Image: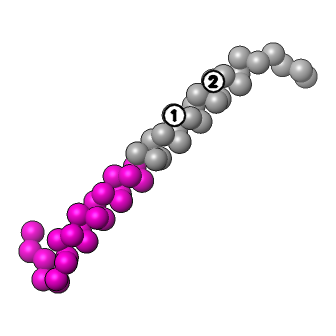
Amino acid sequence: MYVAVKGGEAAIANAHRLLADRRRATAQCRRCASTRSSSSSALPSTG
């Protein structure tokens, strides 16, 4: 890839790192939500 701006390669690397961090955070949130919903379904119904 050709980058014509000084520091452009570092900016691209930082953007990739940021996106990877966001993807990991989103995956962790999904896991937490699925764990909470499965554990709450095991509680007895009061209704």
* Residue depicted at 35% across the width and 57% down the height: 19
Measured from the top left, where is residue 26 in percent x and y?
47, 47
Quarter of the image where the C terminus is located: top right
Q: Is residue 33 above or below residue 35?
A: below
Q: Residues within 10 Å of mark 1 (few under 14, many from 20)?
A: few
> Is residue 19 a member of the stretch shown in magenta?
yes
Q: Residue furthest right?
A: 47
Quarter of the image where the N terminus is located: bottom left
Measured from the top left, where is residue 22 in percent x and y?
42, 53
The residue to which callout 2 is attached is 38
Q: Nearer the viewer, residue 6 or 25?
A: 6
Q: Amino acid at mark 2?
A: Ser
Q: Residues within 10 Å of mark 2 (few under 14, many from 20)?
A: few
> Is residue 18 a member of the stretch shown in magenta?
yes
* Residue depicted at 13% across the width and 77% down the height: 3
| Residue 16 sits in quarter | bottom left
First of labels 2, 1 by sequence position: 1
Measured from the top left, where is residue 32 in percent x and y?
56, 35
Q: Nearer the viewer, residue 11 or 35?
A: 11
Q: Is residue 46 above or below residue 15?
A: above
Q: Is residue 24 above or below residue 38?
A: below
Magenta highlight range: 1-23
Q: Is residue 39 left or right of residue 4?
A: right
* Residue depicted at 65% across the width and 29% down the height: 37
| Residue 4 sits in quarter | bottom left
Colouring rule applied to residues: one colour
Q: Is residue 10 left or right of residue 44?
A: left
Dot label at residue 31: 1
Tag 2 secondary structure:
helix
